[in-house]
Image (tube, rainbow, N blue to C red):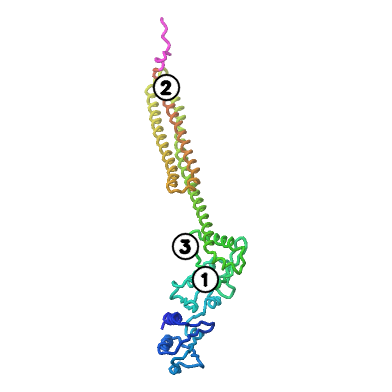
Amino acid sequence: MTNRYIYKKLVDFINHNEVEIKEDEFVYSFLVTDKELLKIDELSKSGIEVDRFEGDQSYERRDLTGLYGQNVKAVFLKQSIVDAGLNVYSDWGEYLSYRNNILTPQNHFLILEDGNLYPFEKEKASRLKNYLKITKFIRFLDGLSELESIFAGGRKPKVVFVQKVRIDVLISYGPSDLDNDLDGFESLERIFATTEHETQKNSLMRETLYSFLYSEKQETRFQYLISSMSEFSTEFMENYSLFVSEFSLEKVRKDYEESKREYVSKINEVVSGIHTRMLGVPAVLVLAAFRFSDKAVSGQVVGNIIIFSAVLVYALMMHYLIKSQKDTLKAIKSEAAAHIERFKSDKNPDEVKSIGQVSAEVQKKCTLEMSRLSIFYWMIGILTLVMLGLLLYSVGVLDSFFDLKTEPKAE
């Protein structure tokens, strides 16, 4: 027969009969009848033997057939039940008097006081469920402790946290503490089930434990903790939410600073390229001026036209290059603005405020550099006009227009 079957038979017997539970034994008083004797025999077949029968004297089972109609007591010694492989305790006080039971549940046990049977009926009994939560919470605290695991045995069960000062939490609780359902502990479990921010979570938990327990006596800290689990978990959740918010904000800020550097690098690359090419404007102007010839001296009008044509081609190329670079700057400016718009649409006001300055700086730089490129437009235009003037002067158009040529003297 399985332990579950034997436990169930014992629990059913206690629940359906008036059984007096004592420290070392439990006693069933009954009137000897065939029905009552059948109960005793069925219990015996399941593996739970009556140690003795008491009336006017002690009796054996075979003696009961001659005692019909008389009151008799069936005495079950707990030690005999334990020897049969069952862990049976009169009440939670007896169960929790053992160090190991405080820390972790036995594989199977029965509390006679309220019929709590583990693990077969752990979902039905509130005290049993609360006990299992408490032992789980103890393992949770042990994982954060600065000392060797309390499950190693040999020492007084306590966990230690070092945060500003040392906080010792003695693991001690009694039957009345099993009325606490540890509301809020499930939320802590879910947060610590992930590896995200693991170091920071542990540090925040120690800090919360310190702020919550430092004014309590060492002997009552654990009981205070489980009785105030809702407030404790709320305090930790608030601290953790604040950390996550600041962490996210800092991450966003770093991301945007990195984006800013990328945008500025792109802008500088665009501007650097156009600056290099614009160095050719004064060089072209000087070279063309020296290469242009007065027709009256050299008669090289065709050469001047060729030089002007080359300068005009250069000016047109620079015009379209500047226009292309301005379009690139506009695209960079739009991309930077789109970042802030995405955060606005995601409803992250803190992030929007944090990165707004970064986005504004990028757009301001784009606007400044586009203004400078507009100056280059003027430079190209001036170059073209100067070269056109030199060409017109070399072919004599300007002289005729301004009537600057000297009239020939009459002979």
The kind of residue tagged 3 is Arg
Up the image or down, 264 lies above or below 97; here it is: above
What residue span does the magenta drawing correspond to? 398-411
* Image marks 2 and 3: residues in contact by CB distance under 8 Å: no
Up the image or down, 383 lies above or below 190; here it is: above
The kind of residue tagged 1 is Leu
Circle 1 residue:
178
Q: Residues within 10 Å of mark 2 (few under 14, many from 20)?
A: some
**First-in-chain label (2 vs 1):** 1
The kind of residue tagged 2 is Gly
406 magenta-colored: yes
* Residue 171 seen by the camera: yes
Q: Position of residue 368 (x, y in %)?
A: 48, 36
Q: Residues within 10 Å of mark 1 (few under 14, many from 20)?
A: many
Q: Position of residue 344 (x, y in %)?
A: 44, 46
Helix, strand or loop at label 1? It is helix
Up the image or down, 137 lies above or below 400; here it is: below
Circle 3 residue:
190
Helix, strand or loop at label 2? It is helix
For residue 353, side relative to residue 395 (left or right): right
- Report how far apart the C-alphas of labels 2 and 1 lie in the structure: 102 Å
**First-in-chain label (1 vs 3):** 1
Res 389 label? 2
Picture residue at 50% right of the left edge, 45% below the top: 353
Q: Position of residue 351 (x, y in %)?
A: 48, 48
User: Closer to us: mark 2 or mark 3?
Assistant: 3
User: Closer to us: mark 2 or mark 1?
Assistant: 1
